Image (tube, rainbow, N blue to C red):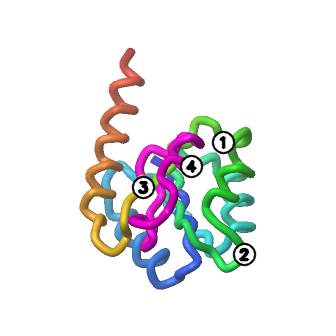
Amino acid sequence: MRILIADDSSTIGKRLQRLLQQLPFVRSVVYSPSIATAITGAEFMQPDVLILDHHFPEGRGLDVLESLRDIIPATEVIVFSAFAGSIDHEAYHRLGVKAVLDKTGDISLLMDLLAEMHDASRLGERD
């Protein structure tokens, strides 16, 4: 599994990157600290999963998704934000987001979801 993390907090982004690199089914994890680098990274990497923050100094996670909608249509997106309780979940779901999780308390849910996504992709390979 190739994962791109887009989060303006380098502390959270790099810590999450180190944590995800330890998962046996993860092949690569790239961290992008801004909307511009997230868009460029996604275009180049074509990640299986994009873990996306909601709030960036230069815009919102929705801006990233709207820019990438046609470029990475097969990428699963998980919004991982400290603002998860107050953001417009429906707007994200309309853009195909798999889940909106709270980064202050849902790390185990994120890990479980990634494992489920990996297992589901392996089942799809067998069909």
Of the numbered discs in the image, which one, if any, rests on residue 72? 1
What range of the chain is rendered magenta?
Answer: 79-99
Dot placed on the residue nearer the N-terminal end, 3 or 2: 2
Closest to the observer, 42 or 57: 57
Q: CA distance from mark 1 to mark 3?
A: 19 Å
Determine the residue positioned at 39% across, 32% down: 121
The residue indicated by pointer 4 is: 91
Query: Considering the numbered disc 1 on the image, is that residue within a helix, a strand or a loop?
Result: loop
Magenta segment: does it hold 119?
no
Kindly give the residue lying farthest to the bottom in the view shown: 11
Q: Which residue is mark 2?
A: 58
Provide the secondary structure element on which disc 3 rests: strand
Give the structural element (helix, strand or loop) at label 4.
helix
Give the CA separation, mark 4 to mark 3. Answer: 11 Å
Q: Position of residue 9 (x, y in %)?
A: 53, 81
Residue 100: mark: 3
114 versus 60 height, above or below: above
Q: Residue at x 28, y 71 (%)?
A: 105
Q: Which numbered circle lies on residue 16?
A: none
For marks 1 and 4, the one nearer the N-term is 1
The residue located at (53%, 61%) in the rendering is 52
User: Image height check: is 70 above or below 33?
Assistant: above
Q: Of the residues tagged 1 and 4, which is closer to the observer?
A: 4
Image: 31 above or below 115: below
Q: Residues within 10 Å of mark 2 (few under 14, many from 20)?
A: few
Amino acid at circle 1: Ile
- In reply to whether residue 86 is colored magenta, the answer given is yes
Could you tell which of marks 4 and 3 lies nearer the N-terminus?
4
Q: Residue 59: x percent and y percent?
A: 69, 70
Mark 2 is on which residue type? Glu
Q: What is the CA distance from the residue labelled 4 to the residue labelled 2?
A: 19 Å
